[in-house]
Amino acid sequence: DINVMKDVTLGFGQALDKCREESQLTEEKMEEFFHFWSDDFKFEYRELGCAIQCMSRHFNLLTDSSRMHHDNTEKFIQSFPNGEVLARQMVELIHSCEKQFDHEDDHCWRILHVAECFKGSCVQRGIAPSMELMMAEFIMEAE
Ligand code: BOM
């Protein structure tokens, strides 16, 4: 369900403003979090990984070693409408991406790679939301 991923992304994105300063992610490097799903989005700034780490911490989704906290992440996703449909699948996708980059000791870089891998897996499985959908919803929420 593409609406689930849209809602979870916008919910997660609520923490971006809080995390900008501490991660030094400028608006030039990432304007709004929903651009994550854009085809030409670039995973090249370490600061973005730091920001995702900060945002995940904000929702208590990380362990002490900055890996995904499985139970909390599943509950977080389930807290959105129809979230239970994708919760297990998303946790599994993120975890399989984590395993691929476990050798990366720098948390910000590792999380950036995990995020890129996660996006790719979502696109592959057809559960990534379209940018049209993301933007429409974002504009509606701002109004
Ligand atoms: O090993 C650290 C785990 C970090 C997970 C990062 C993956 C998520 C990237 C950002 C995309 C977010 C969209 C929805 C939120 C899912 C919880």
Image (spheres, rainbow, N blue to C red):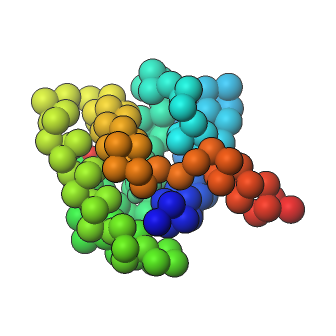
Determine which quarter of the picture holds residue 101.
Answer: top left
Visible residue check, residue 78 = yes
54 or 126: nearer the viewer: 126
Q: How far across and down, in percent of the image, does residue 37 sit?
A: 53, 42
Visible residue check, residue 18 = no
Residue at 54 percent across and 32 percent down: it is 39
Q: In this view, does 75 lie above or below 10?
A: below
- Is 109 displayed left or right of 37 in the figure? left
Q: How far across and down, in percent of the image, does residue 46 sit?
A: 43, 26
Determine which quarter of the picture holds residue 104.
Answer: top left
Give the tally of numbered discs.
0
Q: Is residue 79 above or below residue 12?
A: below
Q: How far across and down, in percent of the image, does residue 57 sit?
A: 40, 56
- Is 49 displayed left or right of 24 in the figure? left
Q: How far across and down, in percent of the image, does residue 89 sit?
A: 28, 62
Q: Is residue 98 above or below residue 45?
A: below
113 or 121: nearer the viewer: 121
Determine which quarter of the picture holds residue 113.
Answer: top left
Q: Is residue 136 above or below residue 36?
A: below
Residue at 34 percent across and 50 percent down: it is 125
In the image as oriented, which residue stretches furthest toward the top? 44
Residue at 63 percent across and 44 percent down: it is 131
Q: In which quarter of the image is the C terminus?
A: bottom right
